[in-house]
Amino acid sequence: MNDLIPLAQARCMPRRGSEHRLTDASIREWLPQIPEWELVENGHALSRTFTFKDYYRTMSFVNALAHVANAEDHHPDLSVHYDRCVVRFSTHDVGGLSENDFICAAKADALAG
């Protein structure tokens, strides 16, 4: 990926096969760009809980994120509650994390403002 393009402006590319799985060193290098996200599932996924004032705002975020996920063809796992949404990204086709997970995490951050 071009380091000059901010993650939130990058586009996802199809990733299939373990050769696209990020190394632990790459993950550590990319994590500072999405500081509110955490590694979960032994480093195989990214997760963040977004909090909102009410259900309407939570659902507005979920719907906006669904639009982004569809446009990028990279879909998160969501756990939606009244005032929060837990977002989890992982690239199943590579068996862990790929660049796409970091790109979409940054896009989710941008949506939440």
Image (cartoon, rainbow, N blue to C red):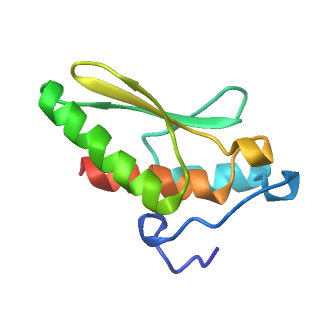
User: Image height check: is 58 above or below 63?
Assistant: above
Count of numbered marks: 0
| Residue 27 locus on image (x, y percent) | 68, 50
User: Image height check: is 95 above or below 1?
Assistant: above
Residue at 28%, 43% (x, y): give it: 63
Q: Is residue 21 left or right of residue 75?
A: right
Furthest toward the top, the residue is 82
Q: Is residue 11 left or right of residue 58?
A: right
User: Image height check: is 111 above or below 43?
Assistant: below
Q: Quadrant of residue 78?
A: top left
Q: Quadrant of residue 71?
A: bottom left
Res. 33 in view: no
User: Image height check: is 27 above or below 90?
Assistant: below
Res. 79 in view: yes
Q: Quadrant of residue 70?
A: bottom left
Quadrant (top left/top right/bottom left/bottom right) for the N terminus: bottom right
Q: Nearer the viewer, residue 86 or 24?
A: 86
Residue at 26%, 41% (x, y): give it: 61
| Residue 39 locus on image (x, y percent) | 61, 34
| Residue 90 locus on image (x, y percent) | 63, 41
